[in-house]
Image: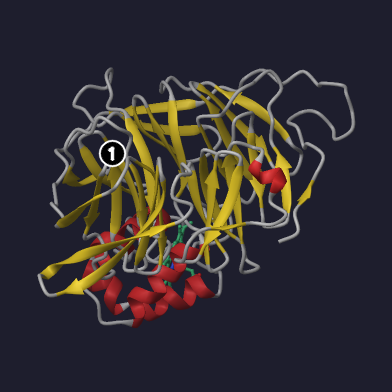
Amino acid sequence: MVLRRLCPLVLLVACGDDTIVEPPPPSEKELLTVAEGEPMPAVETEFIGATLPANATAVGALGNQVIVGTTVGAHAGLFVPGSQGAAGSIDTLALGPAEARVNALASFQAGLLVFMPGSVGFTSGAPVEALADAEPLAGLGVTEVTSRKLASEGASHMLIADSAAFEFDGEELLDWSIPGETGAPTAAVAREDLLLIAYGERLYEIDRESKTGVAVELEVGRVNAIACESSSCDESSTLFLATERGLCVRHSAEAYTLYTLTNSADEGTSVRGFALDTVSQRLYAWSDSALLQVTSDAIPRKIASLEPASLPRVGAVDAAGDLWLASGTTLSRYETGVPLSFATDVLPIMSAYCASCHKAGIKGAPPIDFEDYGVAKSKSDRIVARMADGTMPPAGSAAVPADKFKVVQLWAAEPSP
Ligand code: HEC
């Protein structure tokens, strides 16, 4: 790895230029507050637990293996399906260096980057090796990472560091400092075309190309985490905010929806974090008491109850689609890796991108109820063909993120319900 550090690409400050341009006034955002509404159907997923040697700080997945970062190093848990029936068992194997605290983990090439205080390592399931040339990364004090898959095989990582958010694509390090903000951001995500960076209750939306941004006025309290609904996070992907007042969905620059997850629109439940299944593109979020599956067009669905935990929860999804959550010394695996189905995976896509015209047969669209399983299944060839040639949804309507289209293709290709 040859690491090049670029001169800071600071918001509203030209590179190598000291003139700070006054930020434009905050734009008005529409914030639609939605209470829980219908009680969320609880689908208790089975889970198995394991006890960690120290408190968990980060979780990453390598195939069917999970790597848990703790206050005293990285520990690999290998899921062994088997003798005790579906529950299986977890073998823990320690990964050196034993004493170093792990602050964050991020997928990198065939392994994981391991961010520790003052150093960065790499593991592919064997003991953590020091990364040569990683000095600029090591000095940043990275505490959290969100990643985006690039069209060119690799990945781009948004690093939440002590002094700012940085973007790292394996070679170049971009500095996304914001004038007037010091200290660590609380959350950040990078989409193909824009970045969202939060410093507590203050949220900034930054246009990648012009490197200009606006402060977003939203009354959602502290922003704890931000996630993208698809692994490539292309321009049409919806962004989600885990906030003190609930789950907030960014539909566009002007329209955000806040789900307070209580039956009161004034209060709210704090949402803490996210994990994305990069195969089925299912996005999970968690509050202190519930595990949720979130989609861009519907009320978040509760899929399991969680015991209140005194330490923060961290999580990741493994190659089988199962979600692993760790808090304190407890690691739990939730069996979310059920096969693709119309109701769970395809219906939300049809509702968000196709039903607006086809349900009522408006804008010249033939009235076809793509939200009906039988109809969608019988027309799956046509659905895939028209989405593949880029003619549906028609130009001018919101495009379907590429990873979401792959989910429709996978579903259509197999006789899944
Ligand atoms: C802005 C309105 C609009 C949206 C949104 C839209 N369509 Fe269409 N659709 C049309 C119109 C108009 C036609 C008829 C003209 C044509 O075939 O191009 C059509 C025709 C079709 C047909 C042809 C019917 C057939 O049996 O061959 C299919 C299939 C289709 N759409 C699928 C989809 C899918 C899948 C989505 C969502 C990913 C979608 N459409 C979203 C307007 C829309």
Q: Nearer the viewer, residue 177 or 330?
A: 330
Nearest to the observer: residue 229 or residue 129: 129
Residue bearing mark 1: 328
Residue 361 shows in the view: no
Q: Residue sitting at 50 percent across and 30 percent down?
A: 186
User: Eyeballing the image, is 38 above or below 232?
Assistant: above
Q: Position of residue 12 (x, y in %)?
A: 77, 28
Check disc 1: other Cα within 10 Å, few if <14, some if 14-19, many if 20+: many
> Is 311 or 193 nearer to us in this picture?
311
Q: Describe residue 81's horizontal placement relative to residue 348 as left or right.
A: left
| 293 sits left or right of 11 in the view | left
Q: Is residue 262 visible?
A: yes
Residue at mark 1: C-beta within 8 A of ligand 1: no
Residue shown at the point (75%, 54%) measured from the top left = 3
Give the residue type that dot 1 points to: Gly
Residue at 73% across, 31% down: 11
Indicate the quadrant containing the N terminus: top left, top right, bottom left or bottom right.
bottom right
Identify which residue is drawn at 14% across, 52% down.
43
Left or right of 101, for residue 41: left
Q: Along the horizontal axis of the image, is 189 left or right of 22?
A: left
Q: In which image quadrant can residue 322 be found?
A: bottom left
Q: Quadrant of the C terminus?
A: bottom left
> Looking at the picture, how far across and down is residue 93, in whole percent?
34, 62
The image position of residue 321, as x and y in percent, is 32, 64
**Where is residue 126 drawn, in percent x and y?**
46, 66
Q: Secondary structure at mark 1?
A: loop
In the displayed image of the protein, which residue is found farthest to the right? 17
Specify how the rendered protein is coloured. secondary structure
Figure label count: 1
Image vertical order of residue 2 relative to residue 153, above or below: above
Task: Say above or below: 80 vs 201.
Answer: below
